[in-house]
Image (cartoon, rainbow, N blue to C red):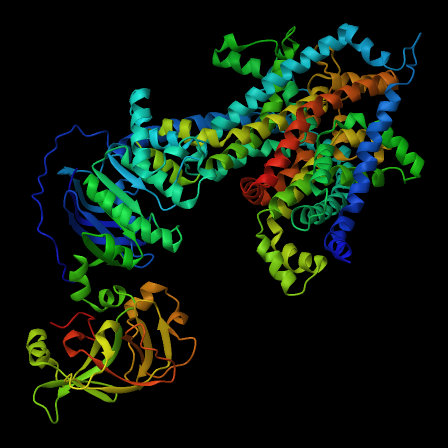
Amino acid sequence: MADIVLDKLTKRFSNGFQAVTDLSLEIADGELLVLVGPSGCGKTTALRMIAGLEDITSGELYVGGQRMNDVLEKDRDMAMVFQSYALYPHMTVAQNIGFSLKLGGVAKADIRARVHHTARLLGLEDLLDRRPKQLSGGQRQRVAMGRAIIREPQAFLMDEPLSNLDAKLRVQMRGEIAALQKRLGVTTVYVTHDQIEAMTMGDRVAVLKAGELQQVGTPSAIYDGPVNLFVAGFIGSPPMHLMEGQIGRGSDVAGLTVRLGSITVPLPDELVTDRGLARWVDRRVIVGVRPEDVRPAHDGDGRTHLAVTVERVEAIGASLLAYFTLDAPPVQAESIAAAASGEQLEHIPLVGHEGAVVCATFEPRSGLRANDKVEVTIDPRRLYFFDPATEDTIH
Amino acid sequence: MRSLRRIGRWGPGLLLVLPSIILIVLFVYGLIGWNIKTSLGTQPVLNGPSGVRNYTNLWHEERWIRDLKNLGVFTVVFIVGSLAMGAIMALLLDKGVKGEGVFRGVYLFPMAVSFIAAGIVWRWLLNPSSGLNLIFDKLGLDVLKNQWWQTRSWGMAAMAIPAVWQMSGYIMALYLAGFRGVPEELREAARMDGAAEWKVYRHVVFPHLRPVTLSALVILGHISIKVFDLILAVSGKQGITETPAVYMWDLIFQASNRPKGAAIATLLLLGVAVLILPYLVFTVRSERRA
Amino acid sequence: MSTVTAPPPAAVVVERRPRPVPKGRQRRFFTAGKLAALLVFIVFFLTPVYLLLLTSFKSLAEADPASAWTWPKTVTLDAWREAWDKLGPALGNSFKLVIPATIASTMLGSLNGYVLSKWRFPGADLVFTLFLFGMFIPYQAVMIPLALLYNDLGFPHGLPRLILAHVVYGIPITTLIFRNYYATVPTELIEAARMDGAGMYRTYLSVILPTSAPAFVVAAIWQFTSIWNDFLFAVFLITNPAAWPVTVALNNTAGSQVTPFPVQMAGALIASIPTLVVYIILGRYFMRGLMAGALKG
């Protein structure tokens, strides 16, 4: 058991590419911290630096209070679960799991006992004599976990352990890994590109972009209080809608409003003072709203109603998403687009569009269909505002 | 109709390969058959034996037994030497050194040289009164001086040196490819499990290499059985370095004793077949399974 | 960027365990030893070349085995001139032999490899095994019947016989090389071509052939080298000394009374130059092909 402290870790590769820049994190003993971000954001590199599989260019790494920068990976007492599982193909499941113990000189009888114990924990007792190529993906994943667990290390390092599993298995394993970790109480650093995994599993979540830490905090803190456009657009599914707006003074109401295309939404006073929006009057801002905060309008809800035509409907079981277009200019945050691919083609929609595509959340059995006309409202208390220049949240 | 369509599926392929099949059947299997037929003929010597006698008589011959022994010594030294040198060179290069390309280039170039050309210079090197002995003399390494291939009984071991010189580079390439075929993640996993570098090799890398070693063994083995021009070039026709392949040559061209020569040729073929066929069948079948 | 952090635990920097040797120092030690060992091997491999060069520049008088390693007092090109006279025509013969044979056997190998790996037929594996076995037969076993067969077929004497022999006996190894290589081409590529309407030949020309370069290089280098360096077939099938390829001519430079060592050494070098040039220029592709498993079988 140990805490892990990263102090301005930087990794520059020999070809000049800087994968991680000044990453500082403090992971408490027993905590499950998730490193999340799009591909190429440096999360795996950071994990490998903790493991000792990559040299640290600059910065300090402390585990359990000890400086680890120059310690060989085999001496760090950390267990790693690889994305491809990296099971030894010529060894049986039992030998795979027990390999580290064998290296450590543990007596054969002890190894057998502990392997059995671990196998029982993971439901692998019947597979102990099989070879990896005879196992399914889910079974291999468990063997990889078993190999890590049996060592009772000071930390678990997991590199996208679920990405090779099919969707249903992934959902099931998410919960099981999280429960296992709580039960064993081992400090865990978990890397994933799937933000749902991050939100459901982590005690805290650290969002990375292009090698730099954007924000770290509990899932709800990050969800409700993103510090910049990237975090806001990355976390949440379906993602937050982002469009250009303008803060203005209400014509027939006191207080400020925000104009999104042709509609104007009055802003509650608390919001204005809370976020300091007064400074932004008559200025362009980027406005964000989450799909669950765009809902069907009711008479007497005291909000501005928008009359829209439904273009497309997604029935996802628990709710119904109705897609329509607002004539406010959409914002494809450069950072998100660039981080997501690097290809310009990615954010040109397949079918041409004018304006921002917004979806509203309806009750699952509302029977909506394309071309229906409905009225929706946007909850103004749940609006997010971003500085177009810096992409930071306005507060 | 459906079976016609199925034929249409693979028919063209068969047609395309047919010329090669015909050539191979004719030039390989047809000739082997012819050879066997010749080997059963009558030998053009006094009271020339014929038929199966051509084969059985060999085993009473001192010369034949000596030849087999020479072949055995040569094969063992050749195979062990090439595998060992190749493996060591591959190990040294595996993690990457500066100028790896240059090292690899030098280690592999002997493959481009003919046995005859190599034989010419190794003849000097292995000459007891010059060559390597001279160097050892100058360096004060007198203990290493010896009669090389003129050594009674074990001379063939020296003959294996040029062969190792030519083939160990190829073995190195095989092993190097094998080493590098081991996914880096497997090695990393072993390191995370606490293995020191040599243990990583022993538990993760070497088990991966069994098929490479097997195919290397087979290739070297069959070269050894066939080797002929190297021996001629280094020592010329000598009793002390004769192998079945050279004996056969002698019989056919000097002594004009075709049946006996053909018998030896068939025996050589059998030797190779015993070595190769199981390996071939195993490889092709395991490929299908994969 | 503002970061929201959890309350930090007290990070105490105390070295409680003795630190293992820092990675840097360990590594440097190893590399020096490795380099030394690699250089020893280099010496082993280059010594014969050194001796060849050294002797080739000596005059006949100086070329005594007993003084093998001493530098020539007089450097002379006589041996080279004589070797060139003797071997020059043979070099031409070798080229006339190797180039057609290499082209033909690699083409056949490519077609065979294609069919045996991608456009299979029942019994393909058996055919492949039969081919492979042909690679391993001792050629001594078929030499005589081969000559007799040629005679029966009325095949033109001399070079054509040798070329055909090398093409036929080269089929197994070239087929192996291409088959192994094509096995790595995803079958989906072929299927996509078939969906687009291509038949077997079209698929070969448009999809397979363009990507075959590495395999062609490996096969061509291997065949060029094998055929150029072959002695057995050449000495057996070519009876006219004027038509000898260079390996046979080289073997014949062994004189009856006094072996002209410098001429022999120079001859060995001359005979090896073409293959060495091919190897130097294309060697890295050969290595790449080897590493990619083209010759694993």
Report x, y in % for residue C229.
70, 33
Q: Is residue B234 left or right of residue C241?
A: left
Q: Is residue B127 visible?
A: no
Residue name at image x 60 percent, y 28 percent: B167
Which of C57/C171 is in front?
C171
Which of C261/A368 is in front?
A368
Which of C85/A362 is in front?
A362
Q: Is residue A147 visible?
A: yes
Residue name at image x 40 percent, y 32 percent: A128
Residue farthest to the bottom? A252
Q: Is residue C168 left or right of residue C114?
A: right
Q: Is residue B17 left or right of residue B212?
A: right
Q: In this picture, is B68 found above or below A222?
A: above
Q: In this picture, is A176 found above or below C202?
A: above
Residue name at image x 58 percent, y 39 percent: B289
Report x, y in % for residue A245.
21, 82
In the figure, residue C237 lies in which quadrant? Answer: top right
Report x, y in % for residue A82.
34, 43
Q: In this picture, is A306 found above or below C206?
A: below
